[in-house]
Image: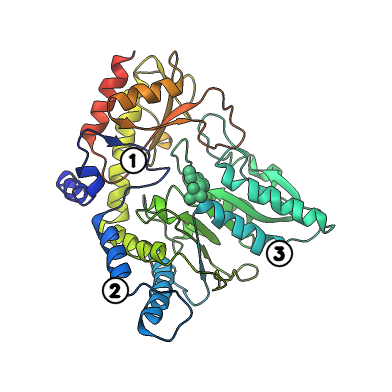
Amino acid sequence: QDGDWQRKLRTQFPIVTAHPDLTYLDSAATSQKPRAVLEAVETYLTTSNANAGRGTYPWANRTTELVERTRERVKEFLGDGRPRRSTVHFTSGTTEGLRTVARDWLVPYLADGDEILVPYADHRANLEPWLEARRLLAERGVGVRVRALPRQESSGDYDHRALADVVGPRTRFVAATHVHHVYGGDMNVHRLRAAVGPDVPICLDAAQSVGHLPVRVDDPDLDVDFVVFSGHKALALPGTGAVWARNTRGPELRPEGWQGTPNTVGVVSLLAALDWLDEAGPERIDRHLTRLATRLTDRLHRLDRYEILGCPAGLAADSALPAAQRRHGIVTFRHRDIPSDDLGFILYSHGFMVRADSLCQAGADDRDGSVRVSLHVYNTQEEIDHLLAVLGSLE
Ligand code: PMP
């Protein structure tokens, strides 16, 4: 049943159906776009394209209305039950979203002697803004301590048992990741909330979860204060993203304002993308992505010459992987003899488009590189099996 559902959805991606010999496996970088998103953009540009927040004629008013409607749609999509309290701030992606939280919200919020906890082995976009905030504050004579979220080497997850050592009475803010962009694992933010208590704001980098699995802030296990994501990884156009802010712990985050021309086309594409994703069903999308990633992980794990990143060392190749190793549509690996960029070229000669470099992971040893396969709803089991056959032939 899920097979029919998936085949039908796949046909809605024109770039996928136009290139039957190519397989796109780099959706963690950016996703492909369904026809509904392309059509929404064309309709907007051919019926009411104008600037937002100014003008007194219908096209301008309609543009403003679409931007405001998208803000409300983001809240609804994220399961926000108190939309009057929260803010949605549009950005160009997760990088700008995290920077916005750091500069516009965190810097004014922190006081001398405060401590913040941030991830040192996740995406660089989720480390640099916090270090920059510390620098800006230091220039003003405000000393802030940045502490690393402890992590488990074997899986990439945070080491929740070691959290007690870094959480203290001055802990005022935590930045975390929802789904890791290299390991694909859920980072279990509910355990972070349990460790820091009910009053400390948590900012979630949801670049690899929004659009891939249900991300609902009404879920008690997702009691976070900021959800930062990339629209372009969730089926909307390049240059789109948003920050959702709960605004109940600490000051309010303001919307981006109307100082310049907003990316109206991008916002319109985000509205269509969220409608499309809701209709497809985030639970179902997650089931599909996790099933394919599990199949790839389990079979790759049985091949001798491959090392899967974030797999506990010493796990016998013939044993099933533990449930904690299940990946939300992302699997990263290395061949023991073939350098990763060569492996990327070999895979492209078979039509597979993968990411083959350092993956922007903070603190990672870039020399080794790795190959990342990242999936979205258009990918099929046949594509995974074909990939496994090619990888198997390189043993
Ligand atoms: N955080 C994570 C976890 C990511 O995977 C990425 C994109 N690879 C980013 C942040 C940056 O996103 P963007 O390119 O939209 O700024």
Residue 307 appears in view? no
Q: Which of disc 1 and disc 2 is earlier in sequence?
A: 2
Q: Looking at the image, is 275 positioned above or below residue 329?
A: below
Q: Residue sitting at 45 percent across and 15 percent down? A: 336
The three-letter code of the residue at mark 3 reads: Tyr
Residue 47 — which label? 2
Counting every numbered tag in the picture gives 3
Residue 27 percent across, percent down from the top left: 37, 43
Q: Residues within 10 Å of mark 1 (few under 14, many from 20)?
A: many
Q: Looking at the image, is 57 positioned above or below residue 28?
A: below
Q: Is mark 1 within 8 Å of ligand 1?
A: no
The residue mark sitting in front, 2 or 3, is 2
Q: Residues within 10 Å of mark 2 (few under 14, many from 20)?
A: few
Q: Is mark 2 within 8 Å of ligand 1?
A: no
Q: Nearer the viewer, residue 115 or 47?
A: 47
Residue 291: name its quadrant. top left
Question: Disc 3 designates what residue?
Answer: 109
Q: Is mark 3 within 8 Å of ligand 1?
A: no
Residue 282 — which label? none
Q: Residue sitting at 35 percent across and 62 percent down? A: 269
Give the alpha-carbon distance from disc 2 to disc 1, as whole Å. 34 Å
Q: Residue sitting at 55 percent across and 42 percent down? A: 123
Question: Disc 1 designates what residue?
Answer: 375
Answer with left or right where residue 355 lies relative to residue 46: right
Q: Which of disc 1 and disc 3 is earlier in sequence?
A: 3
The quarter of the picture where the C terminus appears is top left
The answer to whether the residues at label 2 and label 1 have Cβ atoms under 8 Å apart is no
Q: Which of disc 3 and disc 2 is earlier in sequence?
A: 2
Answer with left or right where residue 239 lies relative to residue 280: right
